[in-house]
Amino acid sequence: MVEKYRIGLTQLKASPSPLGGRVRVGVKSHASNIVPNCLIPNRKHLVRFWAAVALALAVLALAACGSAAQPTDEAPVATVEPATAPAATPGSGYGSTGAAAPETQDNIAPKFTLPSAAGDFVSLDSFAGDRNVVLVFYRGFW
Amino acid sequence: MAATARGYPFPILYNKKGDVARAYGVYNQSAAYANPAVFVVDTSGSVAWEHRASAYHRTPLDDIIAQLEKLN
């Protein structure tokens, strides 16, 4: 546990901070509950864990479209289509604030299929035409 | 939308390789994790809004809700 928090602190220090170097470490004592034990036995594995991206898809039922339609064509493999990567756009880096009109060309969200905590696979495509999606990148702490 | 094991009403996804974060341009290569960010994707699959939070600042929930309301 101690080692784990130390690593978190190191990473926070390495990040650019608008707070002038002040480091706030958000330690969740129950964090281990959400981390499979197999992922935190040592430093190496721990770093790997934080390297992983925790994606939370908050799907809000705001699109009053059909409710029962349940697309089920996901391949059981995590894939990302690299073709539409708005990512590399200059000026869209870390620290930029909310923009009504994203800088990306076509604004198409990169598609993905990833394993979920529930044990199934979730793909962004499965919400198309049905739900608006709030995609949250969360790195697992803070 | 089925609840996850911990009862959250939204799926929590795991992207060990970070490739999705890279695709969205929020991957911190040196630190090897995703920077916090929020994207609102509309029903057509387009990014309607995005917020790449500054370090140690979260995206205000009200901002996200406001964007969602614009979509309806």
Image: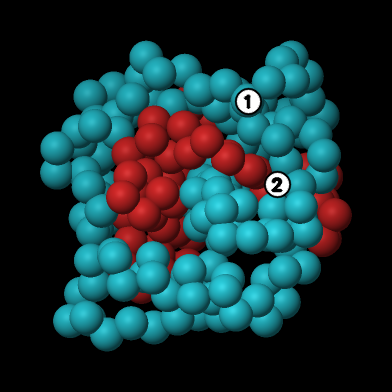
* Residue A15 position within the rendered picture, expressed as x and y whole percent measured from the top left: 29, 64
Are both tags, 2 and 1, on one chain? no
Colour of chain A as rendered: cyan
Question: From the image, which quarter does the N terminus of chain B lie in?
Answer: top right
Mark 2 lies on residue: B11
Taking the view exactly as shown, the residue that stands out farthest to the left is A91
Q: Is residue B6 above or below residue A10?
A: above
Q: Residue at coordinates 68% horizontally, 71% vertically from top-left?
A: A31
Q: Amino acid at mark 2?
A: Pro
Colour of chain B as rendered: red
Horizontal side, residue B19 vs residue A3: left or right: left
Which element carries disc 1, helix, strand or loop? loop
Question: Is residue A103 something that shows in the picture?
Answer: yes
Q: Amino acid at mark 1?
A: Ala
Q: Kindly identify which numbered label has been placed on residue A2.
A: none
* Residue A46 position within the rendered picture, expressed as x and y whole percent measured from the top left: 59, 57
Q: Residue at coordinates 55% horizontally, 49% vertically from top-left?
A: A48
Badge nearest the viewer, 2 or 1 = 1
Horizontal side, residue A2 vs residue B27: left or right: right
Mark 1 lies on residue: A78
